Image (cartoon, grey):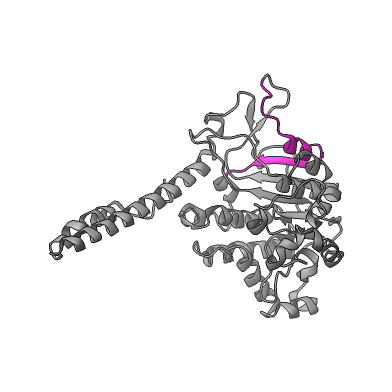
Amino acid sequence: MIAAVNVSVPALVMLLRLPILAARFLHNGRLRLLFGILILVLVGSIAYTYTWQNDNYLCFMEGQGMATQAPVADADATPLEDVLLAEPKPTPGRSIFFHETSCHQTENKQFEKLKLTARQACAIESAALHNPNFKVFVLFAGPTYRISTVGRNNSHPQPLVDAILSYSNVHLRRLNLWSYAAGTPIEEWLKDGRLFRSSYLFSHISDFLRYLTLYRYGGLYLDMDVVVLRNMEEVPPNYTGAESNTHLAAGVISLAATGFGHEIAESCLRDFQYNFNGRDWGNNGPGVITRVAQKICGTKDIAVMQEDPKRCLGFKVFGRGAFYAVPWKKWRDFFEPEKLEETLARCKDSYVVHVWNKHSSSLLIKQGSKSAYAKYAEQNCPRAYKAAGEYF
């Protein structure tokens, strides 16, 4: 089943015949040539889109039960264990989750070793460091291999991976999208393939998984572009944070594994499938938790949600200062030394800082930088910060 196919063979045949049909009506040679070129460009674009969708669909498919038979890029590599099967399993309501949905492959279709950027490793380490009584799970949606540190060919060191695994509460796992969704309200929806026709496939799989994970286990979901600054183990569950005056954000969500928290997770899954839009980046992430909270709280006013917790029935909406003290339009404040004191003051009461990787990922900072992000990393993910090398 190749669910990513959304252009039928008859449609492609018709497109290929269009220049011939049109030529009967176009007597001008130049018009015929231009028309033919336009059709070829259109067909090429459709073919490219089909190939991209199909390759990425197959990338995720290769990880679903076939990872142990796939070609491996290193003799000492072993596949990560499935989160549903391996021990220890997530403790419901007492685990922190990160998702990695890039589905890395080499050009010859070998599956690559586990990859983490320094900033992803920082997010994971900061969560583990400040929450020692929570298990921290990093779930990889594609086929992923861990290089053994004691194998005969340790020519590919993984210092960032070793840094986070030096924490006993960090666990790396892979997941099978289909078995992970089995028995949940979104199982049948996943099978129809709409998710794989998304224009923002990796982002929307991440959106899909955060709500599915919270449905399965409860606990705390975090984006990989955060730094955790404080212990969150004693913060009562069932909360998220405002990103703006009009939207909640989906980068920090906590839900209880049972009761009201589980009901919220189920509402999120149902909203995700009913309102899914593969052409809208934010509709299936922040849009979901915003719409669900509006129904719970009986208002679209984010300020009212924060001011009157009773109307949200126990679901807490933190103000922007808790997780998003620096808005995305000011993301550079984390990286500019002259903004250091201002940014530290702005985030002094934050549980988490979000550094807006979508905008900031290409802006490297040098070890020892006087920027706020460097200071946060040095204090809250010291092992990853050191392992990153000259640039973070």
Q: In this view, does 175 lie above or below 183?
A: above
In the rendered image, which quarter contains the N terminus?
A: top left
345 sits to left or right of 57: right
Depth check: give the residue in front, 233 or 29: 29
x, y (%) of residue 112? Answer: 58, 35
When asked about the image quadrant of residue 289, the answer is bottom right
For the question of whether residue 140 can be seen, the reply is: yes
x, y (%) of residue 37? Answer: 27, 56
142 sits to left or right of 85: left
373 sits to left or right of 3: right
Numbered range of the magenta stretch = 153-176
When asked about the image quadrant of residue 227, the answer is bottom right
In reply to whether residue 154 is colored magenta, the answer given is yes
Determine the residue positioned at 66% across, 76% down: 246
For the question of whether residue 169 can be seen, the reply is: no
Depth check: give the residue in front, 358 or 182: 358
In reply to whether residue 199 is colored magenta, the answer given is no
x, y (%) of residue 55? Answer: 45, 44
